[in-house]
C-alpha cells in the first residue's frame, strides 16, 4: 500500500510540475516575474498555515528551536524556493515554456554530481556518460545544432540553468541537514523565509510591480491559486516525503517526465512548436538523465 501511495504522490508531483511552465508563461502576462514569484510563495504559506494542523506528523521529529536549524532552513528556503523561482520566472520571460521545462529539469544531472561530492555516491563511468549526454542534449535544445544562431535567448538560458543548479543544491541541503524535521513545518518555515527574501528582492528591483499585478483577472487568480497551493504547498511536502523515503537518485530518475509534460502542455495550451533538432536534443537529454540514474531503474 505504501509503495502504491508513493507512485500516486509521484504522479501528482510530475503532472503538477509539468503543467507549471505553461501556467507560469500565461501568468507572466499579468505580473512581473519577481512579483509573481512573491505572491505565489505568499499564497502557498497562507495555504500551509491553514492546513498545517491536519498534515503535521504526529511522530517525534527534530526540533526547530536551535539557531542552527533555523539558519539552515533559511538557507534551504533561499536556494530551493526564492532564488529558484526568481531566476526561473525571470528566465521564462525570455524563453518558451516548453524549452524552459527542459532547461530547468537538467537539475537531476547536477543532483547526481552533488551526490558524489556530498554523499560519497561514486561517479561511475555510466553516470559520467549520462551527465555528458544530458548536457549535449541540452546544447542541441538551446542552439538547434547551430551555436552561431542561438534558438534561445542566452541570458534567459543562463538564468534558467542557474535556477536548475539552485534547486539541485537545495535537495542536497535537505538530504544533508534537514531529514528528521517535520516536513509540513519545515515547508511552512522555508516558504515563509522565501517570501521575505522575494519581497526584499522585488522591492529592491521594482517596488511598484507589487501593485500592478492584475488580480482582477480570473485567469491569473486561478493560475496563482493552482501553482501556489497544489504545485508549491502540497508538492513541496510530497517532494520532501519522497526524497526522504526513496532517496535523491530515485526521485531524480523520474523527474525526466516533467519536461515531457511541460513540452506537451506548452504545445497544447500555448501552441508552441519545437524543431526537429530540438526534439532530438530533448530525447538525448532525457536519455542522459536516465543513464546518470541508471542503477535505480532496474
Image: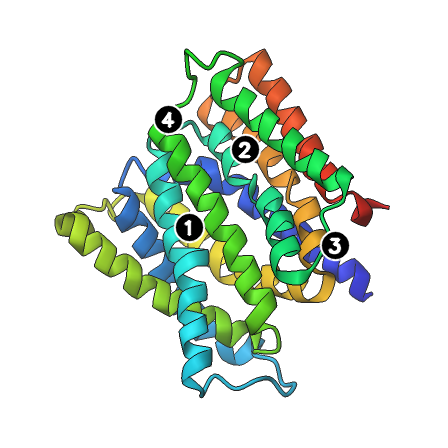
Percent of width and height locating residue 105: 56, 40
Q: Residue at x 47, y 33 (%)?
A: 100
Give the residue pinned by disc 4: 154
Q: Nearer the viewer, mark 2 or mark 4?
A: 4
- x and y, in percent, of residue 233 in the image: 48, 62
**Seen in the image, is 132 located left or right of residue 54?**
right
Label whose residue precedes the other's in the sequence (2 or 3): 3
Mark 2: few/some/many CA within 10 Å (<14, 14-19, 20+): many
Q: Which residue is mark 3?
A: 7
For label 3, the crowd category at 10 Å Cα-Cα, with few meaning under 14, some 14 to 19 and many 20 or more, is few
Image-quadrant location for residue 293: top right
Q: How is the image coloured?
A: rainbow
Residue 235 visible to an observer of this rendering: no
- Helix, strand, or loop for circle 4? helix
**First in residue order: circle 2 vs circle 1:** 1
Q: Please report whichever mark, 2 or 4, sits nearer to the chain's N-terminal start.
A: 2
Amino acid at each position: 500500500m505504501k509503495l502504491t501511495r508513493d507512485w500516486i504522490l509521484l504522479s501528482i508531483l510530475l503532472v503538477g510540475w509539468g503543467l507549471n511552465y505553461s501556467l507560469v508563461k500565461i501568468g507572466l502576462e499579468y505580473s512581473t516575474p519577481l512579483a509573481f514569484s512573491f505572491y505565489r510563495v505568499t499564497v502557498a504559506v497562507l495555504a500551509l498555515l491553514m492546513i498545517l494542523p491536519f498534515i503535521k506528523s504526529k511522530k517525534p521529529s527534530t526540533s526547530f528551536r536551535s539557531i542552527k536549524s533555523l539558519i539552515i532552513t533559511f538557507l534551504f528556503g533561499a536556494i530551493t524556493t526564492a532564488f529558484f523561482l526568481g531566476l526561473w520566472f525571470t528566465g521564462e520571460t525570455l524563453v518558451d515554456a516548453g524549452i524552459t521545462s527542459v532547461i530547468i529539469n537538467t537539475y537531476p544531472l547536477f543532483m547526481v554530481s552533488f551526490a558524489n561530492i556530498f554523499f560519497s555516491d561514486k561517479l561511475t563511468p555510466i553516470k559520467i556518460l549520462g551527465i555528458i549526454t544530458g548536457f549535449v542534449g541540452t546544447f542541441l535544445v538551446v542552439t538547434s545544432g547551430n551555436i552561431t544562431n542561438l534558438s534561445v535567448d542566452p541570458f534567459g538560458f543562463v538564468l534558467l540553468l542557474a535556477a536548475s543548479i539552485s534547486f539541485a543544491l537545495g535537495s542536497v541541503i535537505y538530504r544533508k541537514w534537514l531529514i528528521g524535521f517535520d516536513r509540513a513545518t519545515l515547508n511552512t518555515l522555508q516558504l515563509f523565509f522565501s517570501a521575505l527574501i522575494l519581497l526584499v528582492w522585488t522591492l529592491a528591483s521594482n517596488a511598484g510591480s507589487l501593485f500592478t499585478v492584475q488580480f482582477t483577472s480570473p485567469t491569473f487568480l486561478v493560475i496563482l491559486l493552482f501553482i501556489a497551493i497544489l504545485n508549491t504547498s502540497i508538492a513541496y511536502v510530497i517532494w520532501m516525503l519522497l526524497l526522504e523515503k526513496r532517496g535523491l537518485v530515485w526521485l531524480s530518475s523520474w523527474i525526466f517526465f516533467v519536461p515531457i509534460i511541460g513540452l506537451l502542455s506548452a504545445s497544447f495550451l500555448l501552441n508552441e512548436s519545437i524543431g526537429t533538432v530540438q526534439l532530438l536534443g530533448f530525447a538525448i537529454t532525457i536519455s542522459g538523465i536516465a543513464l546518470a540514474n541508471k542503477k535505480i531503474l532496474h
